[in-house]
Amino acid sequence: MRKLIILMGMVFAVGLTASAQSNSRRDLFVGYTYIRATPQTTGAPSFAFNGGSLSASYRFGWVSLVGDLGGYHVGTIGGVDVDSNLVTYLAGARHSFHHTDRYNLFAQVLFGGARLNSVAFLTGGASRNTLAMAAGGGLDSFFTPHFGVRAQADYLMTNFQEQPAQNNRQNNIRISGGLVVRF
């Protein structure tokens, strides 16, 4: 508990010193993420991954460069134990439509990869890397000049070869919410 109080104090102190800067160009997001996965294998049900995301961005006017890292887990699907983990690592561009001190409405397109550790879904092994892409948007709402909350929704496409080998493109929905720090 003492370490948590010290950490919160340090974050607050950094926020106070950063408040002297009039134009925040960087932000850091950390939050909970829900993925509604839709496999293409005939008869396979949709299921949910739960996890978290971390993203950082640097703004140039209305456009930002973004890096996004997420980790997610699913334990059972339709009563079957699958114990699978998904990691996404993406980068791309974000366009802010309405950027003020209190709000930031944005759309983004990110490209990168995904890694799935699972015996239940993959052909020929328990771990695979593949290409991934996310496109969507969100809204940041700031309650102080440097701290706020984000709500975000994305289309997440992955290309894992499924069992049996019928299709290799999954069309998923990714929903995130959490805290944003600008500095």
Image: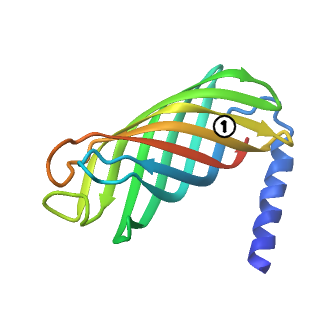
Quadrant, the N terminus: bottom right
Left or right of residue 69, residue 9 in this image? right
Q: How far across and how far down the image is residue 70, in percent?
A: 48, 53
Closest to the observer: 22 or 81? 81
**Residue plotted at (86% across, 49% down):** 16
Closest to the observer: 76 or 125? 76
The image quarter containing residue 8 is bottom right
Q: How many marks?
A: 1
Left or right of residue 2, residue 107 in this image? left
Quadrant, the C terminus: top right
Say few, some or many: other residues with alpha carbon within 10 Å of mark 1 (under 14 / 14 to 19 / 20 or more). some
Left or right of residue 25, residue 79 in this image? left
Q: How far across and how far down the image is residue 73, in percent?
A: 44, 63
The image quarter containing residue 77 is bottom left
**Residue plotted at (39% across, 57% down):** 86
Q: Residue furthest bottom?
A: 1
**Residue plotted at (46% across, 56% down):** 48
Q: How far across and how far down the image is residue 145, in percent?
A: 84, 39
Closest to the observer: 175 or 1? 175
**Residue plotted at (74% across, 76% down):** 3
**Which amino acid lies under the numbered mark 1 shown in the image of this protein?**
Arg
Residue 38's place in the image compared with 91, above or below, is below
- Looking at the picture, the colour scheme in use is rainbow
Secondary structure, mark 1, is strand
Q: How far across and how far down the image is residue 114, in percent?
A: 35, 49
Q: Check disc 1 and report the residue beneath it.
A: 26
